[in-house]
Every structure is written in structure tokens, then in C-alpha cells.
Image (cartoon, rainbow, N blue to C red):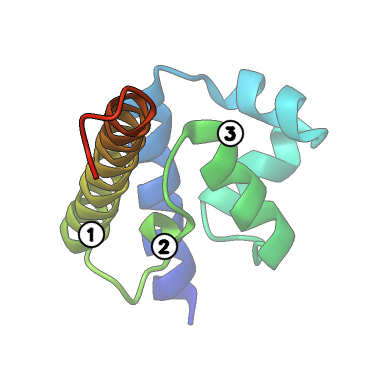
Amino acid sequence: MKQLYTEWGKRVRAGLALSDTSVADLALRLGLSEKSLLRTIRGERIPRPHESAAIAKELGLPEAFLDPHLSPASVLLASECLNSLEAFRQALDREEARLRELLTARASTGAIT
């Protein structure tokens, strides 16, 4: 079990490095003491589920990134895919709205029957 929390801590450290955030800054934003956060990162204290979620959010990472059962690379890849799909969906929505406006404009001028 300790190994899981040690892995969790490694992922938090990676997230801190990726986001260029210090332990002190993260602890302050989370409302935790720096000592408590460090104990959690070292695997000396079990992270509470809400703490893990808040840490991921503050570091700009998908919550699953901190799950020691999942590969960090696969989590980030899946997150990137979801972001790409969402961007594509938004682009389709904009294009659909533009086409509707075009059709409405043509219908109002009598160009489409």
C-alpha cells in the first residue's frame, strides 16, 4: 500500500514540475500546511479523495493523472484526445450555426424554395 502512495507522491511532484508550482504555493492554494502536504507526497500520510482532486485541479492535470494504478502517459494522452474532440465539436457547432444563418438569409431573399 505504501508503494501506491509513494507513486502518488511522484506524480504530484511531476505535476508540480510541469506547472512550475512550489509545494509551498500549492499548500497555500489548498489551505493545507506545507508539512502536511509534504508528508502526503512522501507517502507518510494517505491523501484524502477531495485533496487528490483539488491537487490535480490546482496543477491543471486530469484527476486520473494522480491515480497510481494508471499509466501517466495514457492518462495525458486520453485527456489530450478528449480536449481535441471537444475542440472539434465546438468547431462543428460554429460551422452548423454559420450554415443555418446562410440558409436563413437565402430563404429570406427567396433564393431557396
Q: Residue 78 carries which label?
A: 1
Instruction: Say which of marks 2 and 1 sits in front.
Output: 1
Q: Are marks 2 and 3 in contact (CB under 8 Å)?
A: no
Q: Which amino acid does label 1 sit on?
A: Ala
| Badge 2: residue crowd in 10 Å (few <14, some 14–19, many ≥20) | some
Residue at x 65%, y 62% (from the top left corner): 47
The residue at which mark 2 appears reads as 64
Say whether disc 2 or disc 3 marks the residue closer to the N-terminus.
Answer: 3
35 or 70, which is in the foreground?
70
Q: What element carries label 1?
A: helix
19 vs 49: above or below: above
Q: Do the residues labelled 2 and 1 touch (CB within 8 Å)?
A: yes
Residue at x 29%, y 45% (from the top left corner): 83
Q: What residue type is labelled 2?
A: Ala
Say whether disc 2 or disc 1 marks the residue closer to the N-terminus.
Answer: 2
Q: Is mark 3 on a helix, strand or loop?
A: helix
Q: In this view, does 55 lie to the left or right of 27?
A: left
The residue at which mark 3 appears reads as 58
Q: Distance between the residues labelled 3 and 1?
A: 19 Å
Return the x and y of residue 81 as percentages of the image width and height.
19, 53
Where the C terminus falls, by quadrant? Answer: top left
Return the x and y of residue 33 as percentages of the image width and height.
79, 33
Q: Is mark 2 on a helix, strand or loop?
A: helix
Q: How far apart are marks 2 and 1 (CA)?
A: 10 Å
Return the x and y of residue 26 as percentages of the image width and height.
63, 27
| Badge 3: residue crowd in 10 Å (few <14, some 14–19, many ≥20) | some
Residue at x 72%, y 59% (from the top left corner): 50
